[in-house]
Image (cartoon, rainbow, N blue to C red):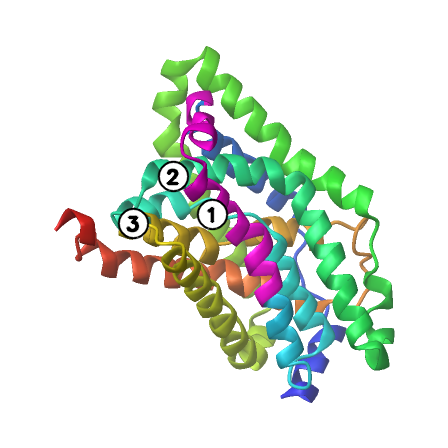
Amino acid sequence: MYESLLQLDSIRINFSQSYILNFVLAFIMFGVALGIRASQFKKLVLSPKPVVLGLALQFVALPLITFLLVLAFSKVITPTVAMGMILVAACPGGNISNFMTSLSKGNTELSVTLTAISTGLAIFMTPFNFSFWGGLYVRFISNRAELLQPLEIEFGQMFETVFIILGIPVVLGILCTRYLPRIAARLKKPLQYLSIIFFIALVAIMFANNWKLFTNYIHYIFIIVLVHNLVALTTGYSVATLFKQPDRNRRTMTIETGIQNSGLGLVLLFNPKIFSPDLAIGGMLFVTAWWGIWHIVSGLTISTYWSRKPPKEAE
């Protein structure tokens, strides 16, 4: 398996529409921000425990668990595949988590609050977590570190990219909600559905343009992403249960931890100022791209299951 995954690194993904991906992700974040109101941030003050716990799961627990996971399987997965997993774990929650939380009869208000705050924190935390945990991983596999030396990226450039893609659209969305509430209310749902369709379409186009590569290696990447995503979902539910959260909150935190904004990861990977086109990062690209597809499948599956089971405290 290791030798097969190693072949991914030299693969050049055919995806000339990377600039469109930037626009689509910014469009997605603008749509997410239309559902954010300043009053929701009061949750952090009035009821801080579930919010702080949810943020800790996203930005502390998931990166840490991912780091331990890649260490445990360091002899099976290649360095770039491991770095792809770390990059996904460093990204904030996915934009469809609010919809999935609502479907699963979870705490939608908590989900929206976590989305709002985690998106803002991601401007700092995504570059930090990728640099920190990625750096630890490189030092751990020092005997193979030559495979990862080129991946030492500039923190400032990643921060700038995340700020442009996440920060600016979110600020514009919040301002639109504040000063143009009627327009924001009309745009909110259509933009959320369109953003999901656009993102899935872009990832599908990328796989279609690289169909032969996809069919040759997907069985390996499928297992890796399946395990990683399952660990993320389990971590969210287990930690929420450990801290005695209500059933609705446990469902919300499970989804928020297991649904990651892999679109941001793709934007970073396709940015030539961060990752040079000459770098052999095929493993990172495959992991990040397939995560974008799989977490929708796993998230909708668990949400549909929970939609048929009333929360325990409501019974």
**Region rendered in magenta:** 38-65
Task: Give, as a three-letter code, the residue at label 2.
Answer: Leu
Q: Earlier in the sequence, mark 3 or mark 2?
A: 2
Per the rendering, the mark at residue 246 is: 3
Taking the image as shown, residue 203 lies to the left or right of residue 238, namely right
* Residue hosting label 2: 110
Residue 148 falls in which quadrant of the image?
bottom right
Per the rendering, the mark at residue 314 is: none
Residue 249, given in percent of the width and then of the height, sits at: 34, 48
* Residue hosting label 1: 54
Task: Give, as a three-letter code, the residue at label 3.
Answer: Pro
Task: Give, as a three-letter code, the residue at label 1.
Answer: Gly
Looking at the rendered structure, the number of numbered marks drawn on it comes to 3
Q: Earlier in the sequence, mark 2 or mark 1?
A: 1
Mark 2: which secondary structure?
helix
Q: Is residue 139 visible?
A: yes
Mark 2 crowdedness (10 Å alpha carbons): few <14, some 14-19, many ≥20: many
Residue 42, given in percent of the width and then of the height, sits at: 44, 25
56 drawn magenta: yes
Q: Earlier in the sequence, mark 3 or mark 1?
A: 1
Residue at 64% x, 74% y: name it.
70
Residue 11, given in percent of the width and then of the height, sits at: 72, 72
Q: Quadrant of the N terminus?
A: bottom right
Q: CA distance from mark 3 to mark 2?
A: 12 Å
Q: Is residue 34 visible?
A: no
Residue at 21% x, 54% y: name it.
307
The residue mark sitting in front, 3 or 1, is: 3
Residue at 29% x, 44% y: name it.
102
